Image (cartoon, rainbow, N blue to C red):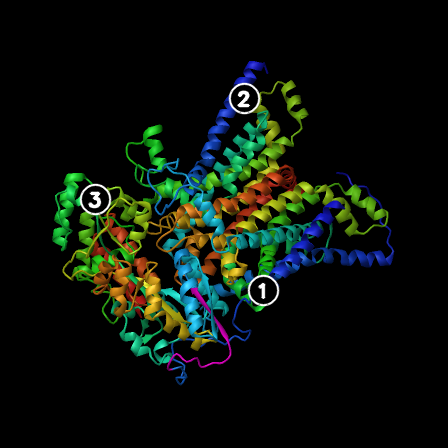
Amino acid sequence: MKTIQTIAALCALSLVVLVAAACAAPVTSPQPAVQTVVVQQTVPVPQTVVVSATAAPTTAAPVTITFWHGYNPVETKQLEEKIIPAFEAAHPNIKVQDQAVPYDDFHKKLLTAIAGGTAPDVARLDIIWIPEFADLGALAQLDTGMSDFNDLKGKVFAGPLATAAWQNKYYALPLDTNTRTWLWNKEVYDKAGISAPPKTFDELLADCAKIKSAENIPCFADGGTYGWAVMPWIWSSGGDITDPQLTKATGYVNGPDTVAAYTMLKDMLDKGYLDKGILGGGLDTSGGFAKNTIGSLLEGPWIPAIFAQQYPNVPVNWAPMPAGKGGSISVVGGEDIAVFQQSPNKDAAMEFVRYMLTPEAQLAMAEVGQMPVRTDVTDQAIKSQPYFQYFFDQIKTSRARLPHPNWPKIESILTDAGQVILRGEQDPQKALDDAAAKIDPLLK
Amino acid sequence: MPRSARIFSNTLLYTALALGALVMIIPFLYMLSTAFKGQVYVLEVPPSFLPEQPTVQNFIDAWQSNNFSRYFGNSLLVAVATTALSTLVSAMFAYAFARFNFIGKNLLFYAVLLTLMLPNLMLIIPEFILVKNLGLRNNLIGLVIVYLAFSIPLNTFLLRGFFEGLPRELEEAVLIDGGSYWTIFSRIVLPLSTPALATVAIFTFLFAWDEFTWALTAIDDPASRTLPVAIATFQGQHLTQWGLVFAASLIAIAPVILVFITLQRYFIKGLTQGAVRG
Amino acid sequence: MRSLSIAAPTSPPKRRHLFLTPYLFILPAALLFIVFMLYPLVDAFRISLYDWKIVPGANSPFVGLDNYTRAFQDDVFWIALRNTVLYTVVTVPAQMILAMLVALALDAVPRGRVFFRVLYYLPVITSWVVVSLLFKYMFDSTEAGIINYFFMRIVPVLHEPVPWLREAGPALIAIMALGVWKGIGWSMVIFLAALQGIPHELHEAAMIDGANGWQRFWNVTIPLMRPTIVFVLVLLIIGGFNVFISVYLMTGGNPVHRTETMLTYMYNESFNFLEFGYGAALSYILAAIIFVISFIQLKVLRNPVEV
């Protein structure tokens, strides 16, 4: 009797507390019970522009919008303590409920939410997801939905802006950006007798030879052959994956310049200039850099914060990516901000988007290391984080990875091809020919 | 066995056990030492097990971070509720399989076995749509209900085996005296089954406490967030402060160890007997 | 376990009561199970028959069994299947044997059982995510990784560091090591309890008959533990086939899909490539394989009377 009583008591108690917790919790999903059926495909809904031309709120009824993001705890704090209160003060009838989603699972959570019709009103999305979600019909078109879109469009960097478009329509606006630029270890370079970082591929190879012979360490390292890693090399060599219209890969991904890029990387690996970690199995390359076992890296603007805390004695020196035949071209990273088609509060959501692109909001996030996308606040941002200078310079020529919904599959093919080449299992031309054949059908 | 030989063999055994235990806990030692270090964004190779300037800041930061205690509380609530309810409900289910005949009994049991073998991962999207349509999304009650469903197959399988092995005489005696099956169940069977029940309890608690994927998918509202999801948000896209993550993970392990130690004397015996009968 | 044969009195009210009772007992669990487990599972099967689009209302063409035939023609599917089977075939016996050894040792020592039990069980209760990360770190490919360091300096059997997670073979070994490490405690605890349930008299009787330790182990211990062993075997095999997070976090299936397992492949197809229909088909193929194996095990290995 005792056993059953114990279990029953526990059950009853749990149920009571659960119900109490559920009732006491603040208003959960702000979305009303009525779910609108999602319009499929990318046909823009012929909605006549019923948008607030200025900041004056159109709706009198108070509205709560949900904003999902992958900000880390420090960035989230800034968002919740500075930005959202400022927005809510300027728009008394709009409340913003933000939700930090673990970055690694963000994509999956969004997909499930879209499938279930519970997508947020607005979200900060990785730039590479925009074509995919736009193609699914999950995002609202901003160029037709926001009357001041062209105005905003003109105020942001071109590279990041390109990531917000799909089939010549804009489904997002850039929110924050970053790129990779050349991080070089002065001690390693000094020891090899190199006074300045390489400006061209030729200089790079010469410097690598010196570093190798003087210290027997690689002059460069990266974590793999995925897009983020190889695109700077491909583009700087003058190559690309597809033609500008994204119709075919043959002739491009297996074109002479792209092949030259991979050949160079393979050569560097064989000579010990490129760390073997590019084949996988290595840990964070910044650790090696800090210990003077790697000469240079292509890194992003999060490095100064990390080094300041963990390796305070390691100097951080930046330079532009060495230029190849195509120039010094790096890859654009960052996030865009988008409104979901399922949202019943699109106007309010777009207000928030607008606000996030104001100088105040952009600079507030710059304080915690998020590079702004507005071209007119770069000077102030640099005052707040001096190292931004190098990244803003590099961004001028940085390009976005393939803006196509099938990018995940294409990247997978490219990654595999890179591995096979670097491991010496296939020669670059053959491997890239095979890749081209696989990528072509995906571009239809 | 002569005393000296026994001492020798015991020493040998203890040494072997200790070495094995060391292998078991080396990763923890590293986790522990990192948790006591300041700013660790990059795990260093080679590792240093002893922090140079040990600090408890990570633990403090983890606990005080944005509502951590609330998430801890949510997880505790969900885990306890799931455990209590699942134990009861699975026991009833298992008892029916062990003692009764009813329409569809074999089919149902094979269905239970089948779900035991399937990866829950494949269920996520259909489950999400279902749960959303029933209004059970984004709240703790819905979470408990889904966890209950997920835990029933294994618990039932275990308990059925155990119940089958119990002597029927006691139950039949109650029937003769005019008692109901519920009386048998609650006054005879359950008390005799505390070992198996404790087993089921710890399995379920561990599952509910650590479950991540479904909690992440179903819950949006930060007020209803559970601990594993909260710890995952400490991991940033570009920067992760590992000391903080490990400290938080260690805080998260504590209740489970506690439950294990408390229940383990029952747990051990119970598992055996469930296993013996299968 | 002889049951008394007593004719149960058969007054009609009791009969009706008896009829309803089973259904009342199964009601809560069956309801939860059918609604929240079976229904989504069946729905997942339905999804596997379509080129399923995730957005509600989008057109998802019916493709019948195409997703299934596609799997059988897919190279990566076969690699994933091979790796999954390999993983299971290696880790399950390893876990069981090591767990048995530890259980035997713990059964024999006079003190400290609880202490060791907790230590060996710690890996079991830690999250897969955390331990996968720690193992990834320990199996670093340079000589500074703990494992390489150990085998190069402390027990010098290697001249060069092993590129653990960089090459498929060593990576699989590392992943399996994690699986075994994490699982030993679970089986150990079960075996230890079973061992402690064997009456001493049986061992003593065998000793009197002149049996030594080894003979006693095989002729007394193992037969008495047989149901336990079968039980553990079934569950471990299910777990082995379901390996996911460790692979996902340690190698991601790389290089070039060579360490892919069924679930990492399914997950990637579903959530990265948005091929949900295909992913669902992959899950069902995996489930079918597990079901067949488990079914055979239970039929063949269990004593008939217990099925």
Cα–Cα gap, marks 2 and 1: 56 Å
The amino acid type found where label 1 is placed reads Leu
Q: Residues within 10 Å of mark 1 (few under 14, many from 20)?
A: some
**Image location of residue A410, percent across then percent down:** 31, 62
**Which residue lies under the disc numbered 3?**
A218
**Which residue lies under the disc numbered 1?**
B136
**Image location of residue C294, percent across then percent down:** 55, 47
Residue drawn at x 34%, y 71% as measured from the top left: A358
The amino acid type found where label 2 is placed reads Asn
**Image location of residue B78, percent across then percent down:** 59, 54
**Which residue lies under the disc numbered 2?**
B10
The amino acid type found where label 3 is placed reads Pro
Q: Is residue C63 visible?
A: no
Q: Is residue C74 magenta?
A: no
Q: Is residue A352 visible?
A: yes
Host chain of mark 2: B
Look at the numbered disc 3 and give the secondary structure of its residue.
loop
Q: Is residue A112 above or below residue B197?
A: below
Magenta stretch bounds = A53-68
